[in-house]
Image (cartoon, helix red, strand yellow):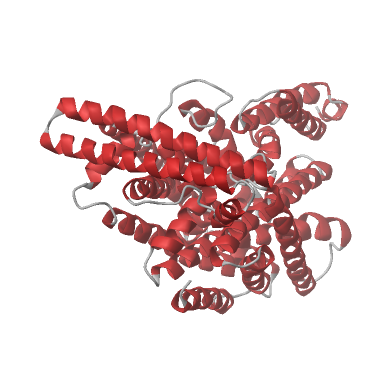
Amino acid sequence: MHPIDWTIIAIYLAWIVWDGLRLTKNSHELEGYFLASRSLPWWAVGLSVMATQLSAITMIGTTGQGYTDGMRFLQFYYALPIAMIVLSVTLVPFFHKARIFTAYEYLERRFDAKTRAFTSLLFLLSRSMSLGVVISAPAVVLAVVLGLNVTATVLMIAIPTAVYTMFGGVQAVTWTDVKQMGLIVGGLGAAAIVLVIGLPDEIGVVQALRIAGVSGRMQTFDFTFDITNQYTFWSGTIAALFLFCSYFGTDQSQVQRYLTARSVAEARRSLLMSAYWKIPLQALVLIVGVFLFLFYLFTPGPMLFNPVHERELQQGPRAADYRGLEERFEAATASRTAAATGMARAEAGGDTQLYGAAKQEFLRREAETRAIRGEALSLVRETTGDATYNDVNFVFPTFITTQMPIGIIGLLIAAILAAAMSTIAAELASLSTATVIDFYRRFYRPEATDAHFLSVSRVATGLWGLLASVVAVWAAELGSLIEVVNRFGSFFYGSILGVFILAVGFPRATANGAFVGLIAGMGAVAWTVAYTNVAFLWHNVIGAVVVVVVGLAISAIDPVRRRAV
Amino acid sequence: VSITSPGERREYLRVIVLWLLVLAGLFALQEYFS
C-alpha cells in the first residue's frame, strides 16, 4: 500500500481519538459519562444507533455476500421498520420514565434482583464474545490485505476505540459514531462510483444490472416457507422481527444509545431514523457487492480473494492441481465475459433470439465459474483443515487494495476501521455500564461517590477491551466469521426478549415465572440448536415464545403471587 | 402500548406506508431486472 494511504489511516486513527476526547462534556458525573446527561439530539442518537449496528462485518462480509449471492440478504432487514414502531410504543416510554441506566435495571423494578442480574450476566457473556468476533473479522482481513499480523490489526482497532470510550464516555461514543457513519456512507458511495465507472464503455448501468438479474443477484424476495433457510421473506419479516425487537429493545449496546436522548419523543425519532434508512443503507452495501461481481465479470480477477491462501496453494504440494483449476477458471471467465457482452449487445440491438441464446450461454458459464471456484475453495479447505473456510470477507478489501486509486484506498480502509470502531465503542461502553450499574453498584458498593464509579467504569472499559482483544485473536483461528456474531446473540436474544414481553405486556407475570421462563427459553433454544437444523433467526422466535408461555404458566401457580393477590 | 399524540400516530403510519412502498419498489426492480 502507498505511504499516502498509510498516512490517511494514521490521520483517521489520531483524529478519531482526539475528536472523541475533545467533545467530552460532563463526563465527571455518572449520568454524564454513561448517558450524556440525557441531553443528546435525536439525529445524533439515530446515527449512533445505525453506526452501532453497522459493523465492519457489514462492510466486508455483506459486500462479499452481494458478490456471491446478490441482494437476497436484504430480506433479513425487512422487519426492521416494524420493530422500530413496536419498540417506540412499548419499551422506549417505559425505559425513559424509569430513569434507568441499563435495560436490565428495569427488570429489578418489575420483577426481582435475580432476574435483573441473570439477564445482565447473559448480556455480558454474549456481548463480550460477539465483541471479540466484531474485532476479529476485520482484523483478519486487514492483516492479510495490509500485510500485518492479526495481533497488530486487533490492537490497531481496539486500542484507539478503548481510549476514547474509557475517557470520553458515551458522549465520545455518540459523536464519533456520527462522524464515522459519514465516513462509512462516503466510503461506500465512493466505491459504488468507482465500480460503475469501471464498467466497460459499451455496458450501461441498466444493462449491467440486467446481467446481474439474469445471474439471480437482483433477487430480493424469496417466498419459500422454509425454517431452515434464513434468507426468505418469511424469516426476514417474522423471525427477524423478534431479533430486531430484542437487539434494539433489550441489548444494552442499543438501549444505551437512545437513553441519551433528551426526551421520549427524541428517543423515538432516533429509532425511527433506522426505520427509514436501514433498508436503503443495506441495499447500498449489497449493491456495491453486486457491482463487484459485475466489475470482475468484465475485468479478470483472482480465483481466490485471500492472497495468502492463493500463494500457499501456488507454492504448495497441490500446486499442479491449483494451476489446472486456474487455467479452467480463466477459460470459463473469458467465455462468461464474452456471453455477458453478447447479451448486452443483443439487448441493445433488440435481437431477442440472440439475447436468449447469449443468456443461456452466460448461465452455463456462470455455473461453470462458480463450480471451479467451489473446487478451489475445497482445495483450500483440504490444505488448511478449515472445513468451513470461505473467502467472501476478502472480496471487497481485495478489490479496494488492488483496484482503487491511491488515496481512496486509505479512505476505504479508514471507513472499514470506522465501521468496526463505532460498533466496538458502543459495545465497550455498554459492557462497562452493565458491569458497574448492575453488579458493582448493585451488589458491592451501593453508596460510593460518582468519582469512584467513574474510575471503576474506566477500568471496566479497559478490561473488557482487553478481554475482547484476546477473544478476537482466538476467534481469528476459528475461520469463517460471517453470521457468527448473530449466532452468538441469537442463543440468548429471543429468551431475553421474552422476559421483557412478560415485564411490559403481562401484569400478572411474576418474578419466579419470568426467571423459570427465561431458563426454559434458553433450554429450548439449546435443544433446537443441538437436534434440528432450524435457521438461527427462528431461534429468536422459539426463545421468546417459550419464555412467555412457561413464564405465564409458572406465574399462574406461583405462591408468591397468590399471597400478593 | 403508548401512543401519546395524533402526530406520533401519523409518523408511524408514514413509516408503514414508506415501508410498503420500498418493498413494492424492490419487488418491481427484481422483476424488471430478472
As drawn, A291 above or below A550: below
Residue at 30 percent across and 42 percent down: it is A337
Q: Name the residue rendered at 35%, 40% in the picture.
A: B14
Q: Nearer the viewer, residue A510 or A274?
A: A274
Task: Please indicate whether residue A50 sits to the left or right of residue A109 in the image.
Answer: left
Q: Nearer the viewer, residue A506 or A235?
A: A235
Can residue A509 be seen?
no
- Give residue A66's quadrant in the image: top left
User: Whole-percent x and y of residue A401?
Assistant: 45, 63
In the picture as drawn, the residue positioned furthest to the front comes out as A320
Residue A338: percent from the left, percent from the top?
27, 40
Relative horizontal placement of residue B7, taking residue A484 as reference (left or right) = left
- Say left or right for A265 vs A521: left
Q: Position of residue B13 (x, y in %)?
A: 37, 37
Residue depicted at 70% across the width and 57% down the height: A472
Q: Which of A46 and A233 is in front in this view?
A: A233
Question: In this view of the protein, can residue A183 be seen by the observer?
Answer: yes
Residue farthest to the left, as pictured: A349
